[in-house]
Amino acid sequence: MSSPEISGLWGVYIRETRSTCLLKYFLHHLQAQDIKPILEKALRISQAHLNQSKDIFSKENIPLPDGFTEEDINLSTPPLFYDLFALSFVYSMNHMSMVNLGFATSTVARADVLDFFTQAFNQAAELYAESTTFHVI
């Protein structure tokens, strides 16, 4: 595995562990039910990306980075954000993911990693579009 492939996967892993923690927090405190489906979709995609990157790291005997964990969130704290911030988070994170994944995709040659980055980019673009066209009821 090349260093750009490893660093790209490392970045995905760290971003997705952070996103998973924050999305779980947002969903726990969410009151605006119309936002819930997009947050749940974002969480499913983040968890899938984590599993895919773990599989690639495991196959290559590369240790997992120290990402964010359940210990980094406290669901019992009062809400720190308005519900629309959660939607803004989905928008911002997928905006940044498209930039990062676009760059990562252009630096890899290995087929499984290229497929993973391409799929992740397409999912980020889809979530980005959904979050920018979302209408709060």
Image (cartoon, rainbow, N blue to C red):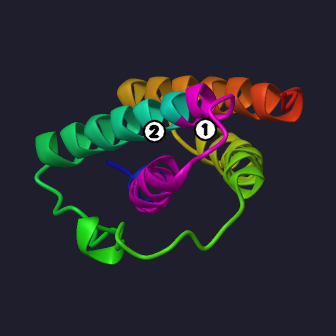
Identified at 38% across, 56% down, the residue is 6
- Quadrant of the rendered image containing residue 42: top right
Q: Main secondary structure of the magenta part?
A: helix
Residue 70 position in % (x across, y down): 26, 65
Viewer-nearest residue: 29 or 43: 29
Q: Residues within 10 Å of mark 1 (few under 14, many from 20)?
A: many
Indicate whether residue 23 is drawn in magenta.
Answer: yes
**Disc assigned to residue 117:** none
Q: Quadrant of the C terminus?
A: top right
Name the N-terminal-most of marks 2 and 1. Answer: 2
Q: Are marks 2 and 1 in contact (CB under 8 Å)?
A: no
Where are the magenta residues, as a range?
A: 10-39
Identified at 58% across, 25% down, the residue is 37
Identified at 13% across, 40% down, the residue is 59
**Pointer 2 residue:** 43
Residue 76 position in % (x across, y down): 35, 71
Spatial CA distance of label 2 from label 1 is 22 Å
Numbered circles on residues, count: 2
Secondary structure at numbered mark 1: helix
**Pointer 1 residue:** 105
Q: Is residue 10 visible?
A: no
Q: Is residue 108 visible?
A: yes
Secondary structure at numbered mark 2: helix
The amino acid type of the residue labelled 2 equals Leu
The amino acid type of the residue labelled 1 equals Thr
